[in-house]
Amino acid sequence: MALPQVGAHAVAPHTTRFAPSPSGELHLGNARTALFNWLLARGSGGRFLLRIEDTDRERSRPEFVARIHEDLRWLGLLWDEPVVLQSARGTAYTLALGQLERAGLVYPCFCSPLEIEASRRAQLAAGRPPRYAGTCRALDAGQREARLASGRKPALRFRVPDNGRIEFTDLVHGEQRFECADIGDFIVSRADGSAAFFFCNVLDDAESGVTQVLRGEDHLSNTPRQIMIAQALGLTAPQYGHLSLLTGAEGSPLSKRQGAQTLRELRERGVLPLAVVNHLYRLGHSGGSDGLHDLATLAREFDTTRLVRSPARFDPVQLEAWQKAAVHAMPAGEALEWLRPVLPTGLDPATAQAFAALMQPNLVYPAEAADWVAVAFGDLPPPDAVGQALLDEAGPEFFAAAVDALRARADELALGQAAPWKAATAAIAAATGRKGPALFKPLRMALTGQGHGPELAPLIALMTPARAIARLERLSSRAS
């Protein structure tokens, strides 16, 4: 069988796809694959397709299909309709398998898993690469009938040519060559009648018009098989690119312990999709401009020639840096919604918006705002030992002077502007002789229970001058 070289220079616009299995939730490795395919398609003005590979009936779950949709929408990786469900394409697979049978390109294989494993071990012991030994390849009609009569159900194996090679250009790894003699006949249909994973892929990609596929490098060895299937069916195989392994900071495969959170877990922590896509974009893709960019900009910059072959290391510290940048770049309305879960119920819209605007430059995750909700709208917890020492050192007279200064400007302080607060602190300084850190540190600790944080002027307006004065009074000589 003549096998042409696959992987000629691709022309725009590209059609790519993301084809997850709904047997679990998407994690960062899945997200990077989806992102790179989306960028390749959108950067060329092409199509990005979503295919759900749900033929594993035991592991596939409808709730995971819904979660995949939710995760992709959250990332901003919207797809072109329709979504293809492999479970609905059984007839197409059966027809294609029949085409191969009529052409004599497949044959029934009755070997059991135990027989195949014994053969594999024998080949490894002999120092040969494991491949199917061809046990059932030359069975005649009578031998096949006898096995069928004994109740053995066959799989279907593709008949790989004894000679020749498969050549293609990988978008990441460049020129690739595989000797047919090293591949061995492979299963295209299981004994239960279901089509094998990479057989379905070939048919689905061709019928959807997929032109490029970026996927994990663990699929590289499947590519020559898929090229042979495509040629046998008279289909055009896409150009493949096999992405480098995503590892943890120590270089080992990314694991849960090293930060392989699901996208749902990241979303629930308040990680922003813009932070995720900017970090993933730099994992295995070199070059491009620095700084935080939206998806449209990343799509314009994405270039398959910049996909690196070496493993890409996920770094939680870098993700947090992108998160901080994304939080600071959020529009005001988005910041308010981001913080909504930690805000008190019933808070009026103007106050909620003012709180979000004040806190946004000081946060990385929404949970960090919880303490500041208590500062602005609730009661302060007792200070820690360091904070108490700071308050004790300042003394009740200092806080009595602060009470007088804030009372004198309470109406102005309610506006949250800097000038009244500056005037109040000047009055406290004049009354106590304190300035600089000796002035501001005990004031901040008394008002917020924190040693650092947002500007105090707008914070006092949110907590109300009355609450601020009450906190100072408890520390003054008048409360003793």
Image (tube, helix red, strand yellow):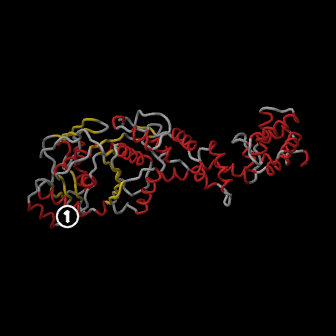
The spot of residue 172 in percent (x, y) is 32, 37
Q: Residues within 10 Å of mark 1 (few under 14, many from 20)?
A: some
Tell whether 251 sits left or right of 342.
left
The spot of residue 317 in percent (x, y) is 53, 39
Secondary structure beneath dot 1 equals loop
Query: Circle 1 is placed at which residue position?
Result: 152
Please say if 362 is above or below 65. above
Please say if 40 is above or below 305. below
Front residue of 72/426: it is 426
The amino acid type of the residue labelled 1 equals: Arg
Front residue of 183/438: it is 438
Quarter where residue 421 is shown? top right
The spot of residue 441 in percent (x, y) is 77, 37
Please say if 56 is above or below 312. below
The spot of residue 303 in percent (x, y) is 36, 37
Count of residue discs:
1
Front residue of 79/471: it is 79
- Residue placed at 62% from the left, 45% from the top? 360
Tell whether 25 sits left or right of 356.
left
